[in-house]
Image: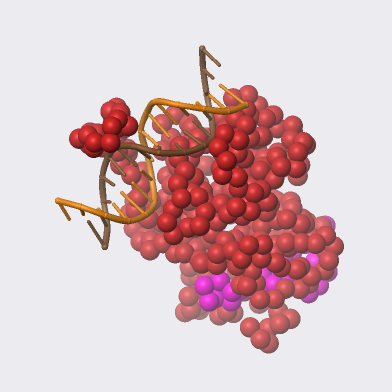
Chain colours: A red, B brown, C orange
Amino acid sequence: MVYCSDMFLFINKTKDCQAEACNKPCFCWRAFFTEKPKVLYKPMAKLAPRKPIPLLENKGSAASDQQREIAEAEARVQSANEVKQHDFTAECQQSLLAKSQQEKRIVNSTIVLESTEEVAQSQSLINTSTVDRPSYDGYNWRKYGQKQVKGSEYPRSYYKCTHLKCPVKKKVERSYDGQIAEIVYRGEHNHPKPQPSKRNQPAICSDTSKETNKSAWSNQHPQTSEAYICRTENQNDVGLTIYSASSSKVPCFYDPIGMHSSVRNPGDSAEGNKRLEATCVEPKIKRRKIAGQSNGAEGCEGKFISQNRDSQTLIPLTVKQITEAFQSSDNKTNFLVDVNNVKLVGILFNIAERITDISFVVDDGCFRSRESPEGEIPPVPEAPWSGGM
DNA sequence: TCTATTTGACCCGGG
DNA sequence: TCCCGGGTCAAATAG
Ligand SMILES: [Zn+2]
């Protein structure tokens, strides 16, 4: 098995387990890979090159590449959601819709792994080329603010989709070393992904400004209904970063920054229909005048504040949660993960040097793989360490 | 000249 | 009512 280095493995909780025989709170999970961001956050102003860089142009500085990677990571997060849409059965989709209001949070941590290409298939949506070509998330974003949030040690950046009238926004928190601390998407795009035109790609800000640069655009993916992207549900997406070593058989995990391990679950209520609240944007009067608070502007701009709004979040998962990992057979590597006190046995299937699938065994013994039809419970693969889970 | 980012000020809901 | 803090605006700035 060949491990791809610097990749993130995101594990998404897609829905609650509905197997009849299962009374326990287990879930269905699906995973996807993304590259591990390495860029350092540089709070410096005006460092970001605004000019979009033609795809493929990047072969340049490592720094650029790193930046791109971060962006891609984000993109994948979002794309994963798309993927999700495809993979699920109608039933699942309904389930998702039910929760659509909830914020989507994805956690990640680091692990090692291989093939960057990831599970590519599913993700083909996004990336496609192994080569860089950042696809970011395929949408164009404009940064409209940055702020140091109180509870967070990292600055939070605010982005808006640049598409006309598209209400989608995203908040990105990134650690100084480039780790994605959290990404939250709100709303759903009301337009298809923009075509990858080298020109005119509004900075895809995937990150703090400086990184914005070079973006190569991507979007290659089939259109997939992006309409669903943000509406997906999960509040508990968890991600693992797999780190790795090129050919080692056993992944070695490490924790670059001692990341956050908190997996936050928005309170989420599932109800609520996801209609984006229309924001009535009225011409606002300029606010920035003198300190005197002027009468409030009269615009009533709806805010997507509640957690039931569509959104997604990326949260790092500490490596501690990956309690064990090792290769069990020719094309499988197992690892044990502890997510919210739920023990998951992850199995990375690797065929032809490509990771083709990942499945998890929840502590209740139910086994779910991305493609597993609802209710079907494939035999539980035996985990080498099963004795001590 | 144009466009995107930076960044401090402002808005506004919650406590 | 005041204060706090997250989110947003928009002038200034940079490329
Ligand atoms: Zn959009």
- State the image coordinates of residue A122 (x, y, percent, origin top left): 65, 51
Front-lying residue, A159 or A12: A159
Give yes or no for residue A289 being in the magenta stretch.
no
Residue A105 to residue A23: above or below: above
| Prevailing secondary structure of the magenta residues | strand
Residue A350 belongs to the span the image colors magenta: yes
Q: Quadrant of the N terminus of chain A?
A: bottom right
**What residue range appears in magenta?**
A328-352
| Left-right relation of A94 to A8 | left
Q: Residue at x 80, y 62 (%)?
A: A245
Q: Is residue A57 left or right of residue A79?
A: right
Picture coordinates of residue A302, whole percent (x, y): 30, 42
Q: Position of residue A31 (x, y in %)?
A: 62, 60
Q: Position of residue B8 (x, y in %)?
A: 40, 38
Quarter in which the C terminus of chain A is drawn = bottom right
Relative to the observer, which residue lies in front, B14 or A306?
B14
Above or below A331: residue A302: above
Left or right of A16, for residue A242: right
Please name whichever residue, A9 or A183, is drawn nearer the observer in this view of the structure: A183
Choose between A41 and A213: the one closer to the eye.
A41
Q: Quadrant of residue B12?
A: top left
Instruction: Kindly identify the residue that appears in the image at 41 percent across and 62 percent down.
Output: A266
Tell me if residue A267 can be seen: yes
A206 w.r.t. A88: above or below: above
Would you identify the image quadrant in which residue A43 lies?
A: top right
Q: Residue at coordinates 66% horizontally, 76% vertically from top-left?
A: A323
Q: Residue at x 66, y 65 (%)?
A: A255
